[in-house]
Every structure is written in structure tokens, then in C-alpha cells.
Amino acid sequence: MKKPKIELYNDHFENAKRYGIPHAQLIIADIPYNLGSNAYASNPQWYVDGDNKNGESKLAGKSFFDTDNDFKINNFFDFCTRYLKKEPKEKITRGKSGNSPAMIIFCAFEQIPLVIEQGKKHGLMKSYPLVFIKNYSSQVLKANMKIVGATEYAVVLYRERLPKFNNKDIYGNNKMIFNWFEWKRDNSKEYPKIHPTQKPVNLLKKLIEIFTDEGDVVIDPVAGSGSTLRACAELNRNCYGFEIKKNFYKEAKEKMLSNIDIQQSLF
């Protein structure tokens, strides 16, 4: 089996041209949720050691990242649609998926209309939502005051044709895939926690398996912890990621991606 190409660049995705990366079957990204200074609101991390008796921590009133305000969603979609593979020209057998590409964008519930609108502006005319269900919530400080959030959201975007779709079970039979998934935390010994909005590697693997085949190319323009790249390495997909923050890039290289060869031999 040919070893997949896994490349993480400490650079902005708008500079992708200098790296000569190929076009992608799937682009998967977690865009900023625009929470601003409320990023840690109702989260115990607002306080020292998670206890309000200890006073506010250095995270109180802070955004997750100082780069969030620089994120330009129009430029992001310009990049994505430029590096997404073109629609295949061959006819598709009725009732079966073809090889059309797709994007999966993780976003806040309130951002879903904006993501769909931007997609249409850039030729991604079709979409449908995904819901991820947790058995925990970060909004613990509100637990005695309101129903707390325990879901995450994403949008699947594509041009006109339904994207590549793998729904075979272990016996080779077609199975239904629902638009909701369980969101289970990764084992921290296997996948280190690097990024405050890090997505579980095992969840990413499920999504990548659905929309790509072995050897396909996946791009993560805002790679963060490198979890998308790790998922692709374990699934034998080629993956290219961009992370502008040096600390996240360094930790991703040292912790998430350093033992890829070992992991590939295990899976």
C-alpha cells in the first residue's frame, strides 16, 4: 500500500500556491465561531481551576484566538472552490453516487445560513446539515439556569451532483447514514488535546471515509491541532493542512503527527 502524503504548513491557506498542492476530493474545515470575548462564557475555564471562588482566570473575557477577527469568509471560500476538484463529466448511474467533490464546514448553528449563502456565491449550490450529539456540555456554569448546549453542527456543500458517498457496511451491503453522529471524546493517550476547538479524530475518520476513497486528497485550510491530517494518515488518504499559529503548528507536528508511521502500522 502506497504511503499517503501528509503535509502541514505553518502558513495561511491563501499562500497555498507556493506549495503546489493538488486539488481535493474533500475539503474539511472548522471555521471561527465568532464568539469574540465570550468564547469561554459558561465554561469552567473562565475561572482559576474551574472554581468561581478562585476568581477569573486569564481566559476570562478572551476570544479563543487573536486571528479570529482576521478570518474573511469570502476569501476562505475563494480558496476552497479554487482547490476543490471539478465535477466529473461522465454520466452517473441512476441511484449511485459518482466522484463529485464536497466540503464539510463545521460552524456554529447561527452561522449555517451564512455558510450556505457563501457556498452558493461560490458555485456550491447544494447543501445539507449535519448534527453531532455529545454526552457532555461545556456550558456547565449555566446548568442550573437553562438547557445547556450539547451539540455541534456542520454543513456539507457541493456543486450540483451529489458527492462521492461510501455507505457499505463490513459485509459490503448498503446502509443508511443518518444526518446525526455521536460526538465521542478521543482517548487523550492516543490523540493529544492541543486545540480548544479540536474535533475528535475518530469522528473525522467517519466523515472522511464516507466522502473519500483511499488515495484521495483531503485539504484542511485551518488545520489547528492537525487532527484532520492524523485521521487521513490512518485512513490512507493524502492530506494537506494550513495552520498560521506557530504554537498550534509546532504542537501538531510534535504530538499529533510525529508518530504517524507507527499508527499506520497499527491500523
Image (cartoon, rainbow, N blue to C red):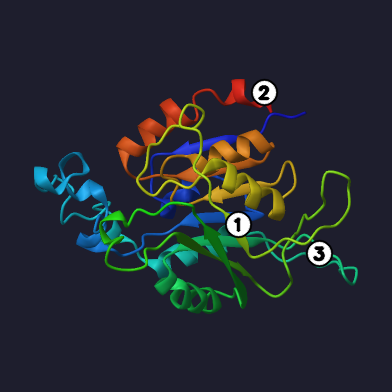
Position of residue 187 measured from the top left corner of the image (x, y, whole percent)? 50, 33
Residue marked by disc 2? 266
Q: Quadrant of the C terminus?
A: top right
Q: Disc 1 or disc 3, which is closer to the eye? A: 1
Of badges 3 and 2, the one in the foreground is: 2
172 sits to left or right of 74: right
Q: Earlier in the sequence, mark 1 or mark 2?
A: 1
- Label 1 and label 3: CA atoms lie apart by 21 Å
Q: Earlier in the sequence, mark 3 or mark 2?
A: 3
- At 62% from the left and 35% from the top, the residue drawn is 233
Q: Residue, x 60% and y 73% (percent of image)?
A: 124
Q: Which residue is mark 3?
A: 97
Q: Is residue 128 above or below residue 223?
A: below
Looking at the picture, how far across and down is residue 209, in whole percent?
Answer: 70, 48
Give the residue at x 83% y 43%.
170
Answer whether labels 3 and 2 touch (C-beta < 8 Å).
no
Look at 54% across and 41% down and name the residue there: 201
Q: Residue furthest front?
A: 144
Query: Closer to the camera, 151 or 146?
Result: 146
| Lower position in the chain sequence, tag 1 or tag 3 | 3
- Find out whether the residues at labels 1 and 3 contact each other: C-beta distance under 8 Å: no
Secondary structure of the residue carrying numbered label 1: strand
The residues bearing labels 1 and 2 have C-alpha atoms spaced at a distance of 25 Å
Q: Secondary structure at mark 3?
A: loop
Residue 235 image-quadrant placement? top right
In this rendering, position of residue 177 left or right of residue 96: left
x then y, percent, for residue 217: 65, 47
Return the residue nearer the eye: 103 or 133.
133
The secondary structure type at the circle numbered 2 is: helix
Q: Is residue 140 left or right of residue 61?
A: right
Q: Which residue is mark 1?
A: 181
